[in-house]
Image (tube, rainbow, N blue to C red):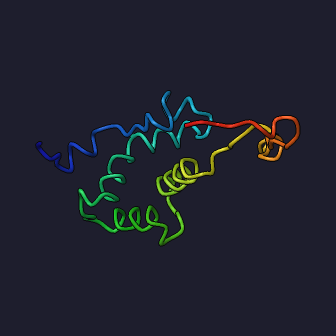
Amino acid sequence: MATMNRDQIMKKPFNDFKNYPYGFARSGDFSIRESELLAKHGSLIAALMSGELEPESAEEQSLLAVARGEKAADSPVEKAWSKYQARINRPKVGSMYGRSRYTDDAFEISGGDDDDLVVED
């Protein structure tokens, strides 16, 4: 499989169909500007994170440090990426009501008239 060069990666719009199937702009999590920045620079940041590309400038080194969590975000691109990472790594809600209403105790079988019940394998 052919590898992509830096120009091809930078021109490719970034999408995360797993977490944002309708795109960043329609998610309600990001402003219009943030969604544009993610689409434009996300592929480059993802390639830097995966080791596919090496940072060539101080800006790219800064992006990589923010993406790794080594530095606080300063530029709008860094802030948008940090927000994206916080959104996709947030804990998932298990239930609308918090914990499950049913516990194992509710299904406990008590002895009584069925003491002679035999279960065969």
Q: Is residue 21 left or right of residue 47?
A: right
Between residue 120 and residue 9, name the one nearer to us: 120
Residue reaching furthest to the front:
116
Q: Quadrant of the N terminus?
A: top left
The residue depicted at 29 percent of the width and 38 percent of the height is 12
| Residue 52, x across and y down, in percent | 24, 56
| Residue 64, x across and y down, in percent | 38, 64
Report the number of discs: 0
Residue 117 sits in quarter: top right
Q: Quadrant of the C terminus?
A: top right
Residue reaching furthest to the right:
112
The residue depicted at 45 percent of the width and 44 percent of the height is 37
Between residue 31 and residue 65, name the one nearer to us: 65
Residue reaching furthest to the left:
2
Between residue 18 and residue 7, name the one nearer to us: 18
Query: Taking 49 as reference, is 108 above or below it?
Result: above
| Residue 51, x across and y down, in percent | 27, 61
The residue depicted at 62 percent of the width and 34 percent of the height is 28
Residue reaching furthest to the bottom:
70
Query: Taking 11 as reference, is 50 above or below it?
Result: below
Q: Is residue 58 left or right of residue 89?
A: left
Query: Taking 8 as reference, is 91 above or below it?
Result: below
The residue depicted at 35 percent of the width and 67 percent of the height is 61
Query: Taking 81 as reference, is 94 above or below it?
Result: above
